[in-house]
Image (cartoon, grey):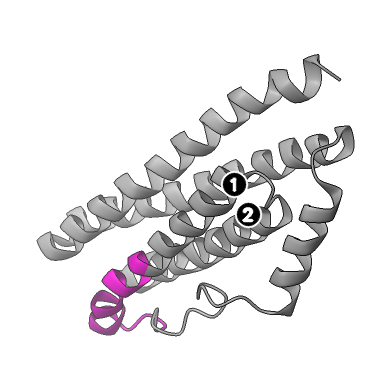
Amino acid sequence: MKLDRAIEDVREAEIDLAKRLRIVGERHAVEHDLYHLGHSRADKCAEHLEKLQPFAERYGARSTAEHAGVSSSPGLMETLRQKTSELLGRSEVTGLMLLADLRKNYLVTQQAEISWIVLIQTAKAARDSELLAAATACHEETEMTAKWLRTKIKVACPQILATS
């Protein structure tokens, strides 16, 4: 079985999602809900990787414990993005950037979600009930991130495109 590959795919997708959520949150820091919820959803990605770690060890996948870029400690680039966002504020240009960023994040979230589905199906085939339970719980949380982003897009579109 290739459970190791499915676990590694989830790992890569969750790391990418966490990075994107943090970057967009910092880039659009004046949108306080985007900043705070983006960071809390990125923290969920880190939790997902921690839940996946025992299964990575069990099936010989790369460690999920070393999830660089998922941590919540701000670096120089994050601080710079946040300060730039505060200086630019809300404008037509930043609105279009926000919409583009939300679209990209939604697609990255869908990649993570489908990776969880693949892992769930593989866990079912392997009859690993522990992995199935963990993957199902994490998938549901990733689904919530996708729903949140879809709602943000629905709210932002008319405000950005119809009123400019």
Residue 74 versus residue 10: which sits nearer the camera? 74
Q: Which residue is mark 2?
A: 25
Crowding around mark 2 (Cα neighbors within 10 Å: few <14, some 14 to 19, many 20+) is many
Crowding around mark 1 (Cα neighbors within 10 Å: few <14, some 14 to 19, many 20+) is few
- Seen at 43% across and 54% down, the residue is 115
Assign the magenta stretch its main secondary structure: helix
Residue 79 versus residue 107: which sits nearer the camera? 79
Q: Which segment is the magenta one?
A: 47-62
Mark 2 secondary-structure assignment: helix
Quadrant for the C terminus in the image: top right
Position in image of residue 4 (x %, y %):
35, 74
**The image quarter in which residue 21 lies:** bottom right
Residue 94 relative to residue 149: left or right:
right
Residue 13 relative to residue 52: left or right:
right
Residue 42 versus residue 105: which sits nearer the camera? 42
**The image quarter in which residue 157 lies:** top right
Position in image of residue 13 (x %, y %):
51, 61
**Mark found first going from the N terminus, 1 or 2:** 2
Q: On screen, 133 above or below 48?
A: above
Amino acid type, callout 1 = His
Residue 32 got which mark?
Answer: 1
Q: Are marks 1 and 2 in contact (CB under 8 Å)?
A: no
Q: On screen, 147 above or below 133?
A: above
Residue 8 relative to residue 73: left or right:
left
Mark 1 secondary-structure assignment: helix
- Seen at 44% across and 69% down, the residue is 11
The alpha-carbon separation of the residues under discs 1 and 2 comes to 8 Å
Q: Is residue 147 visible?
A: yes
User: Magenta stretch containing residue 57, yes or no?
Assistant: yes
Q: Is residue 2 visible?
A: no
Amino acid type, callout 2 = Gly
